[in-house]
Image (tube, grey):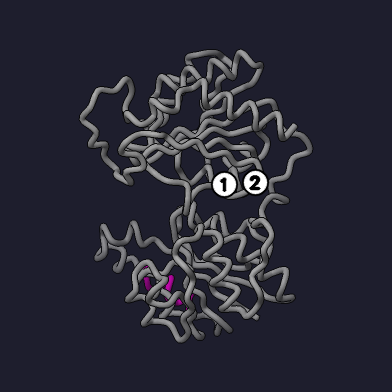
Amino acid sequence: MKVLIIKTSSLGDVLHTLPAVTDAARLLPGVRFDWVVEEAFAEVPAWHAAVDEVIPVALRRWKHRPLQVLRRGEPQAAVRQLRKLDYDRIIDAQGLVKSAVIARFARGPRYGLDATSAREPLAARAYNRTFPVARQQHAVARVRQLFAQALEYEAPDEQPDYGIRERFSVEQRQPSLVFLHGTTWSTKHWPDDYWVELASMAVAAGLQVKLPWGNTAEKQRAEKIAAVDESVEVLPRMQLGEIAEVIASASGVVGVDTGLVHLAAALGTPCVTLYGATDPGLIGTVGAAQSHLRASFPCAPCQERKCHYQGAAEVFPACYGDLPPTRVWQTLDAALADRH
């Protein structure tokens, strides 16, 4: 059986789809997958042994310069790639109008969430078969249930297996921590001074600290944290696969609510994730040795990109005053002790 997956973004959502691929590969001998994904995340599906071809698209980039990209023929090339094969099934795991449109360009019967389950109900009209999947579940469980119904097997009850740990396996983890400090929402940023204090605690415990970054602001924050000690390292700019290697070899990770913490979960690296404006209930990290620290604050979780709190506060965002470095270190130290 040859199946096309439509799951274009974001990084966390793409990673959340991997356990469903593992389920299917175990329960349906011979099933193989192709995968349509945003170009920025094209590495990720290729890490899974059951995925053959990755078809990159650039919807985020194309929408800003539509005429230019049409002249260059990028969308046309993606459509030609989509139509090369006749698929036994096409599964739209995104549930959006844009992903449903992509599915219609491919050859084969289209499967997806029904109108009561999809994020954008209109998308369900594009499918040949639709399935109900209860919304009040974690994203990983929802995708696993969708695949089970679409491919006709019983969804497993065991913990999700992302199917990529073997690719990045190491003989022994290094005495190092990775701090995932970058995120696009200002309300998710843990205060810089807190990162500095936590780095000092890690150095005092004999651990190295590694700091990835993705843009100029994140690099500047990393350099501020690294000023603590020479054992705190600002990494060069890396591709996702290179960051995965760093995370897989580390003893532990501390991160805000960003896609890379889901990569730590997929790789089985102990991780403490900090949630202020957001709630881990339906989208938090899932896997072994994953710890969630939620801010207890009157307006948290607000689910807002901009903080509207007007009261007195010692830090910004104010909700993170409930998650000081001492509390984070205690949680991380316990997680590392348990794993050891």
Left or right: where 122 falls relative to 259 = left
Please, what is the dominant secondary structure of the magenta stretch? helix
The amino acid type, in three-letter code, at marker 2 is: Leu
Which label number is shown at residue 267?
2
Q: Can residue 334 be seen at all in this image of the molecule?
A: yes
In this view, 211 is above or below 199 = below
Q: What element carries label 2?
A: helix
In this view, 196 is above or below 36 = above
CA gap, disc 1 and disc 2 = 6 Å
In the image, residue 80 lies in the stretch drawn in magenta: yes
Q: Dividing the picture into quarters, in which one does residue 268 lie?
A: top right
Which label number is shown at residue 263?
1
**Quarter containing the C terminus:** top right
Q: Please provide the residue range marked out in magenta.
A: 73-82
Q: Can residue 237 be seen at all in this image of the molecule?
A: no
Q: Residue at x 72, y 72 (%)?
A: 27
Nearest to the observer: residue 160 or residue 55: 160
Residue 313 x %, y %:
29, 23
Q: Do the residues labelled 1 and 2 touch (CB within 8 Å)?
A: yes
Q: Residue furthest left?
A: 310
Total numbered labels placed on residues in the image = 2
The amino acid type, in three-letter code, at marker 1 is: Leu
Residue 100 x %, y %:
39, 75
Left or right: where 248 falls relative to 180 = right
Q: Which residue is drawn at 63% across and 80% down?
A: 152
